[in-house]
């Protein structure tokens, strides 16, 4: 995971929020929180950077396939 100088994930990184058991893309940083958005879009949520971890390659692939499947179902 690419990190900013402060030790938090960089904007655009895909991470697992262990506190909520959700995967999200980093959209920004506000105060001490990281703003995440679901890969398929939707409402952002604030996450504590201490509860974020990078995805394994297998987890990232699985998350991206799930995102593509969601998009394909929306366009039927």
Image (cartoon, rainbow, N blue to C red):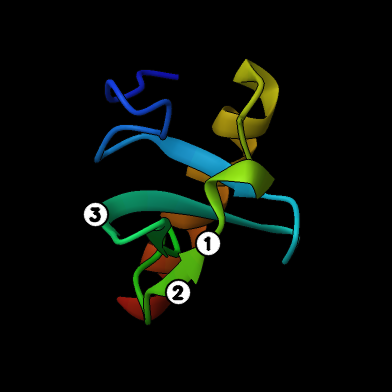
What is the quadrant of residue 42 in the picture? Answer: bottom left
- N-term-proximal mark, 3 vs 1: 3
Residues 65 and 13: in front is: 13
Which of the 4 quarters of the picture holds residue 12? top left
Which structural element holds mark 3? strand
Q: Is residue 27 toward the left or the right of residue 51 in the image?
A: left
Q: Residue at x 24, y 40 (%)?
A: 11
Q: Residues within 10 Å of mark 1 (few under 14, many from 20)?
A: many
* Dot 1: element: strand
Q: Quadrant of the N terminus?
A: top left
Element on which disc 2 rests: strand
Image quarter of residue 55: top right
Mark 2–mark 3 CB contact (< 8 Å): no
Q: Which numbered tag is attached to residue 16?
A: none
Name the residue located 67 percent from the left edge and 48 percent from the top edge: 51
Give me the C-alpha separation between circle 2 and circle 3.
11 Å
Q: Which disc, if any, is residue 28?
A: 3
- Asked whether residue 76 appears in the rendered view, the answer is no
Image-based side of 27 in relation to 73, left or right: left
Among numbered discs 2 and 3, the one appearing first in the sequence:
3
**Quarter placement of the C terminus:** bottom left
Q: CA distance from mark 1 to mark 2?
A: 6 Å
Residue contact between numbered discs 3 and 1, judged by CB atoms under 8 Å? no
Residue drawn at x 34%, y 28% as measured from the top left? 6
Q: State the mark number for residue 47.
A: 1
Name the spot of residue 17 as percent of width and height, x first. Answer: 64, 53
> Residue 66: percent from the left, percent from the top?
56, 53
| CB within 8 Å, label 1 to label 2 | yes
Residue closest to the eye, 30 or 60: 30
**Depth check, front residue: 4 or 42:** 4
Which residue was labeled with disc 2? 45
- Residue 20 in the image: state x and y as whole percent: 72, 66
């Amino acid at each position: 995971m690419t990190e900013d100088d402060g030790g938090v994930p960089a904007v655009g990184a895909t991470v697992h929020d262990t506190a909520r058991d959700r995967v999200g893309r980093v959209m920004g940083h506000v105060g001490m929180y990281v703003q995440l958005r679901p890969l398929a879009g939707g409402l952002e949520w604030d996450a504590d950077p201490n509860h974020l971890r990078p995805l394994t390659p297998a987890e990232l692939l699985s998350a991206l396939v799930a995102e593509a499947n969601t998009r394909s179902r929306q366009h039927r």
